[in-house]
Each structure stands twice: as C-alpha cells, then as structure tokens.
Image (tube, rainbow, N blue to C red):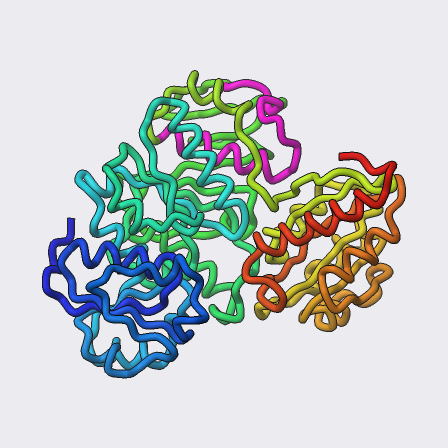
Amino acid sequence: MDGDLQGKRVTVVGCGRSGVAAAHLLVARGAQVTVTDEQPAAALRAPEVRLPAAVRRRFGGFRQEDFLTAQQLIVSPGVAYDHPLLARARAAGVRTRSELELAFTQMPPPGQRRLVAITGTNGKTTVTSWIGTLLEAAGMETRVCGNIGHAFSAAVLEPPAERYVVEVSSFQLEGIERFRPAIGVLLNITPDHLDRHGSLERYRDLKLRLAEQQQPDDALIVNLDDPQLAGAEPPGQARRYATSRRAPVEQGAFVRHGLIVLRLRGEERVLGPRSLLRLTAVHDEENLLAALLAAALAGAPLDALAAAVPNLTRRPHRLELLGEIEGAPVFNDSKATNIGAVQKALENFAPGVILLLGGQNKGLDFSPLADAVAEKVALLVLFGGARRVLATALRGTTAMVEAATLAEAVEVSLAHAAPGRVILLSPGCTSFDEFANYEERGERFKTLVREAMARTPEASS
C-alpha cells in the first residue's frame, strides 16, 4: 500500500461517482481533500455530493489555486487530461493521477496479485461482470468494480476480497503511473472517444497502457480476432495468452468444431459446446472466451467454470429483446455508443433491419458503417444531434428518415414494423444531447416500446 497520503493536500478534480469515491478513500488515508467540479452544487446529482464532512467543496467552476496549491491531483474520468489547468499544474510539478491509479496504490495486501483488469472498446462491462460471476461460482470472494459503476476506490474501502475485477476505460488509463494488473484483458479496439483522444492511434495506445507495468509473472489476454489487437505490440513483459473464435491459439481459449477449448501450459481441456452459453450474439462468444480464460488464470477450477457458463446473462441495454410489434422483434442496444458496437449488433441479423441511429456524436467518422448498413438495413432512422452528420456519412446506403428526438424515431420505426423486419436501437453515439447516460436512453426506449405494445393487442413479449 502507498503510504504517502497522510497530511497531503489533494484536490479531486470532478465530482462524479469516482471522484466522490476517491474523496472518501483519501480522507480515510489522512489526506486534506478538496473536491472541485465545473458544475454548481445544485446541478450535481445527489449521490455525487455525498462527500465526507472534512472535504472542502469548490463547485461552480475550476479555480487555479485549487490546482497549483495541491500536492497531488486525482482526476476523474470525465475531466480531459489535457485541460489547461491540469497541464499548468503538471508543468509546475504537481503530481497528477487518475482515480484508478489512486485505488491501485491503496489496495489491501497482497495488492497487485489480486487484480484482474479489463479494457476494450466494446464488451468490457459484460466481460467484467462475467469474470466476477465465474469467480464467485468457483467460491472466490470477488469485488467487481471500476468503470462498471462501482468505483475501484469504493471497493478498496470495503472488506478485502480474494480478487478485484476492474473495468478500465481509456480515460482512466491516461493517468496511471504504476497500475499493474496480475491479469490484464484486451478485448478489442474500434474508433471511439476521438473527440477527446484525437486519433485512433492515440486511443489504441491508451488502451494498451493496461499492460505497461506488467512483469513476467503477470498475464495478458489479447483477442486475436480483433484487427487492431492482432497486429499490436502491447508494452510490458507479461506472459501472453490469446482468444479466438476463428482459429486455435498457442496458449489461451478458442473454439474448435463448435467446442470451447482452453489450452494452458501445454495441456488442452474442452469445457463443452459453445451452446453452453445460452446467448446467441456473435460478440457473446468472444466475450465468453475472454471471461473463461481470465477466470481460469485467476485460479478458478475448470469444472466450476463449465458449470457456471449456462447461468451467464447479458446485461441490460445490450441487444436486449423487448418483444414483438406487428411481427417485428424489437431490440434495445442503447449501450452501443460507437461504430464497432453497431457493426457487431448488425452481424446478428438478416437483411431487413430498421436501425435507430443517433444521439450526440463524439468526433467519429461514420462512413465505415456504410457497408454494414447497405447490407443489413432496410430503413435508417436517424435521430438527435448527430442526425445530419449521420445522414451525410451514410447517404446512398439505404432509405433514411430523420427525427429530432428518440421518441419521434420510435414512432417512425414502429410505423414500418412488419414480419421479417427487426427494429434495433443501436445508436452509435452518446446520449448526452437528450439523456444523462445510455441507461436512461435505454429505459426511455423500453418505455416507449411498451406503451406501443399496450396499444397493439397482437403484440407479444
């Protein structure tokens, strides 16, 4: 455990979930804590203002003195690392770290050996939760935390667990120093967050930082089916393992003749048929291989893993089947906030999809979606702030209609429902033009669809 916080002046930048958790952890370790946020206190959600009494609160805008008089800055994921005040503080020698790095340094002994960390553009929340489920099924007390919604810093303050399974974002990896998972998982890399990171290369390099501090006694799992990862050279010295649903791998997990195979330390073990997983999306299989391999490397017995697989479920807002209207199945995939996620979703359907695409763009070029849209989509319903950008990028691919809001987009899509069609909300954009997050957007979509079903006697669920 890093014991350098007692009496230190530390400013937490950003008062979201991870910032509040960091403040609690810092106070528990004896630091003098200031929390600052650009939003006024009244605009912060209730959970974000439940700070320890000892914390100094500075809301309604950043102040230079809170950055330059601190001995350390802990940066929340929602604050860009190139913010001018952060850059000025770093230039002045103020140590600047992410909440992820803070929590890592405060893990209970033996610290690093307990840590499994997962990153990627798509699937990381599912894989993180599945690893937690598999380890718990094997009798290992596990804390599932990080970008999944329960901050790593909060988990560190709870009673020690045998394993900490942490979902990690590119934003969190910007501010690491010594972060070193015993088991790291790299799932995939497709364009995302380019409004913040500037380029796919920069984004990819941040993801690869997950492995930067790993040593030869650590493990790194890489999805060889992903083009960006197959040709990448991650930093660090970890032992490399691979996953693939297309071909056998030297060390790792793969599918052969419909069977899930683990090959570790020169020995093969067939866990069972791929149908053990009662989910059928293409990316479910990729996620399963990564989760099984990580859990096996973490010490879970293979028999326990095979027995637990049928109980794995997909999290809400991820290709969630809501029912049928006029013979058309309706799917909620609100979590799909980038191009790669939309492409993965479309892979699961035959041509004839009514696709709801839109929200707030985050600097992405949507032209790479053109081929998939032309092949699979019968009607493109573009909504929200990004609708005109999307229309320009995808012009000529298929029929398209624009709608100002999600509610209008749902009305249009349901009006075209028919047997042989699929209605799919897979927006490819963030929700921030209309909603607080993808969960709120997904719940609103479900409400709109259920209301429509109630008006349609022949609809089924």
Q: Is residue 265 above or below residue 105?
A: above
Q: Percent x, y for residue 58?
A: 30, 75
Identity of the residue drawn at 73% across and 51% down: 448
Residue 250 in sight in this render: no
Decide whether residue 292 is among the magenta residues. Answer: yes
In the image, the segment drawn in magenta is 271-297
Q: Percent x, y for residue 101?
A: 28, 56
* Overall secondary structure of the magenta section: helix
**Image side of residue 112 versus residue 369, left or right:** left
Q: Percent x, y for residue 72?
A: 21, 68
**Image side of residue 45 versus residue 62, left or right:** right
Identity of the residue drawn at 52% across and 64% down: 193
**Which residue is nearer to you in this view: 247 or 350?**
350
Q: Percent x, y for residue 442?
A: 63, 51
Q: Is residue 267 above or below residue 192?
A: above
Q: Is residue 290 above or below residue 428?
A: above
**Which residue is nearer to you in this view: 289 or 330?**
330
Residue 441 in sight in this render: yes
